[in-house]
Structure formats: C-alpha cells, structure tokens
Image (spheres, grey):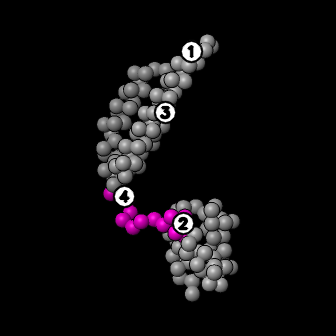
Amino acid sequence: MSKIKLALDVVSDLRSLAESIETLVRAMEANETVPANEAKEEPTKKKSKAKAKVEESETKAPEVEEASVEEVPEEKLPTLEEVRAAMADKSRDGHREAVKAIITKYGANNLSSLDPMHYAAALKEVGELK
C-alpha cells in the first residue's frame, strides 16, 4: 500500500472513532445506556449498508432508550471510594478479618479487584458489623 492509501485509511478510522465517541457522549448526556448495535459499528467498505444500519438503529433507538430509562434503579450505587472508606473505618475499629472475609466472599483477593456490582451488598454487610 502506498503512504497516501494508509493515510486515507487512518482518516477513515478516525472519523469512525469520532462518530462512536459522539454517540457515547450523547448517551451519557441523556443518562442512558448505548444500545449495542450503535456502539459497535462494523468497519465495512460498503458505505451504503453501514449507513442503512445506522439509520435503522437510529429509528429503533428511541424505543430502546425509553425502556432503559424505566429500568434505571432509583437508589444510587456506591462507588469504590465509598466502599473503601467504610471498610477502612471498620478495619480500624478491629474488624479487619471480617472486612477481609466480606471481600473474599464476593470472589476478590482485595477491594480493588471486587466487581462493582457487589459494592452495594459488601457495603451493607460492612455496615452491619458491630
């Protein structure tokens, strides 16, 4: 391949990346999840089919987005920092082994490797320690 052809390929990839980032930002602004078919655009040389897929997904997107809004839980999920602070407090209060047991209960060796989906349950258990 010539250098010009490679440069054009890079430009095409950058444009595709920019479009993906723009879609992500719009979804984040709307506080909604990005549908899988919009987030993953397959790189193809047939522009008309790719555009047709994007247009089709854009027409379907409002239905998916409305369902996502309804599924969002009302309570705020705890962050790693919140869980870390609670565990550090309990650890200082003499519950170090109990805190470690809670972390290993959810399949992690340390708090950093704990799956975020377990933060709420782990925080609740730490709060129950006396």
At label 1, which amino acid type do we have? Lys
The residue that disc 4 covers is 71
The residue that disc 3 covers is 17
Residue 83: image location, x then y, percent: 54, 70
- The residue lying toward the viewer, choosing from 29 and 49, is 29
Earlier along the polypeptide chain: callout 4 or callout 3? 3
* Residue 80 sits inside the magenta stretch: yes
Residue 16: image location, x then y, percent: 47, 30
At label 2, which amino acid type do we have? Glu
At x 38% / y 63%, what residue is drawn? 73
28 left or right, relative to 107: left
Boundaries of the magenta span:
70-83
Earlier along the polypeptide chain: callout 1 or callout 3? 1
At label 3, which amino acid type do we have? Leu
The residue that disc 1 covers is 5
Q: CA distance from mark 2 to mark 1?
A: 48 Å
Q: CA distance from mark 4 to mark 1?
A: 46 Å
